[in-house]
Image (cartoon, grey):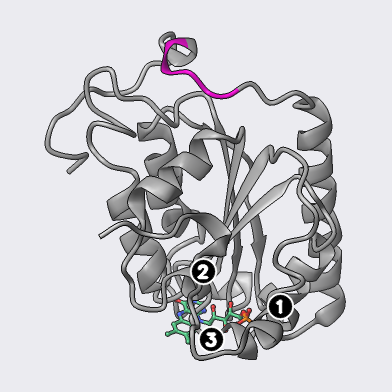
Amino acid sequence: MERPQGPERSTRPEVPQLAQEVLFADYHPPMKKPTVALVYAHPYAERSLANRELLSAIDDLAFIDRRYLYDLYPDFDIDIEAEQGRLEAVDLIVIQHPIYWYSTPALLKLWIDEVFSLGWAYGEDSKALAGKAMLWVVTTGADFKAYTPDGPHGHPFDVFVAPMRQTARFCGMHWQEPIVVHDSHADQAQVAAAGQRYRQRLVAFDAAHPAKTKHKPSESAAVETPALRGGPA
Ligand SMILES: Cc1cc2nc3c(=O)[nH]c(=O)nc-3n(C[C@H](O)[C@H](O)[C@H](O)COP(=O)(O)O)c2cc1C
């Protein structure tokens, strides 16, 4: 069956059209050609404090293609081709979410499993993401001091950064310094300040990439990525 593409896809058919327009009005500000894809995963977005604050700091940036996964795919039935097409069109992929059990919310993990696929993201002559940048924006409940050998989380936070960083590198992407907001419910001013840094990073990136040329695999041929078959395991 043919699937609807892009933001037109109705993910909440029970909500009347007018109400949808109000609900999602801030998701899709007038677009110019996007340079950034924001992949946002929060299973309880309506209860979010920290991620909501971060999103509000970049709300008006018209160069962002927003992919709010739990709105787009409440049934976890990800439109892989649509997602890959949106990523191909941009230079920077931002992945934003609250940390859940030292990792991503479930739908984001599935999104990575399905979208970063063999024959597209990796494998011989498959480097659709190579040369793009990835920025990870993550909030935690715990203070950074909890992320020490003697703390309740037993390891420095960098240990939990490694899987996302290596995923990006495996696909030939340029890993950017992540924005990690620890203890994100303790200090609203801290989250607001992180939001401003987030905004500055995206604005600076867009300014440095004014004319997005559609990504061509041949352009990234020089980027070394492992050509494993059967996945990075
Ligand atoms: C299922 C679940 C798992 C969580 N796991 C972690 C964790 O491993 N480490 C941590 O510091 N916080 C953890 N938290 C706390 C969230 O990361 C924190 O509430 C969130 O970042 C706050 O952002 P928000 O206001 O946008 O929801 C967890 C919360 C939930 C609900």
Q: Which residue is mark 2?
A: 41
Snapshot quadrant of residue 109: bottom left
Q: Which residue is mark 1?
A: 21
* Residue at image point 27% right, 24% down: 226
Label 3: which secondary element:
loop
Disc 1 C-beta below 8 A from ligand 1: no
Q: CA distance from mark 3 to mark 1?
A: 20 Å
Q: Nearer the viewer, mark 2 or mark 1?
A: 1
- Where residue 216 sits: x, y (%)? 48, 18
* Residue at image point 34% right, 51% down: 80
Q: Which residue is mark 3?
A: 44
Label 2: few (<14), some or many (≥20) within 10 Å? many
Res. 99 visible in picture: no
Q: Amino acid at mark 3?
A: Tyr
Q: CA distance from mark 3 to mark 2?
A: 9 Å
Magenta region, residue range: 214-218
- Where residue 137 sits: x, y (%)? 62, 58
Res. 207 visible in picture: yes
